[in-house]
Amino acid sequence: MLTLSLLTSLLVLVNTPLASQAQRGVPGRRVPGGTRGETEQLCFPDMPRYFVPLLPASNRSLTTAAQPTLFWYHSATAAPKANLRVVTIDAQGKRLSTSPYQVEFTPNRQRGIQHFRLPTEDLRLPPLAIGQTYQWQLTFQCDPQDMERRLTISGQIQRVADTPPLAPAPLMSQVQQAAQAGRWVDAFETLLTASCPEPRDPSILSGWTALLNQADLPEIAASPVVQCSP
């Protein structure tokens, strides 16, 4: 499956103590709850442990899509359940009283770049409005017997009006143009569409590496495994 706040770019290197992560004060890029150490091991048994949205350090992205795709990366996981919420927020980041969209699913157990495409036919989540900011929150339930053992990442996304290019551009030019305009979701979507038919194409893999480094996610860029099944 954000001035468009995209999915909040949360990089969680779970090897790092949560206390020191919180001191860095980057909104949305840290796991806000759970039992330190034990929860991470339950969700991600193997090292290294990563759970991060594909966003720059601002945790924000723009998009021209009415139903954009959300992207994140996680290490191989044993989490039995995931929950995704999307809510409307105002300029101060306060949640508005509109009904949130919420869906529960089983996460892909394999490591790699994951995605969730927002539905086109769900009354709970109409097409994103141009100029409106939304917050998404992804939670992994690490222990089915203890609801407090969970890890959460989040991000913001904002829809902007589409401006068609004057002339068709090569794939990597489209990706770079979207990223430079702050439309990180669209940049990753363009790469996903190209990479799934040709997952081993060297030029596309190098495109992932370049874009992830540009988003300040070098650990993931070193091994850009893409999970094509949503």
Image (cartoon, rainbow, N blue to C red):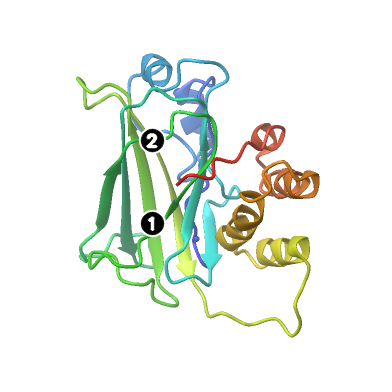
> Residue 112's x, y, as percent?
56, 35
Residue 221 lies, in percent from the top left, at 69, 38
Q: CA distance from mark 1 to mark 2?
A: 20 Å
Front residue of 66 and 98: 66
User: 74 left or right of 85?
Assistant: right
Which amino acid does the dot numbered 1 rest on? Answer: Gln
Instruction: Please identify, in this view, whether the residue under mark 1 or under mark 2 is nearer the observer.
Output: 2
Residue at the farthest bottom position: 166
Horizontal relation, residue 140 to residue 198: left or right: left
- Residue 194 is situated, as x and y percent measured from the top left of the image, at 66, 56
Q: Which mark is residue 57?
A: none
Read off the residue under disc 1. Answer: 135
Q: Residue drawn 53% across and 72% down?
A: 64
Residue 199 pos. (x, y %): 67, 44
Q: Is residue 56 above or below residue 92?
A: above
> Disc 1 vs disc 2: Cβ atoms closer than 8 Å?
no
The structure residue drawn at horizontal position 65% and vertical position 40%, both measured from the top left corner, is 217
Q: Is residue 10 left or right of residue 134?
A: right
Above/below status of 6 relative to 30: below
In the rendered image, which quarter is residue 183 located in?
bottom right
The local crowd at label 2, few if under 14, some if 14 to 19, many if 20 or more residues have their Cα within 10 Å, is some
Q: Secondary structure at mark 2?
A: loop
Question: In which quadrant of the rendered view does residue 95 lie?
Answer: bottom left
- What is the three-letter code of the residue carrying label 2? Pro
Secondary structure state at the residue bearing disc 1:
strand
Q: What residue sits 54% from the left and 60% below the top?
A: 61
Q: Residue at x 71, y 50 (%)?
A: 211
- Mark 2 = which residue? 107
Q: Residue furthest front?
A: 197
- Of labels 1 and 2, earlier in sequence is 2
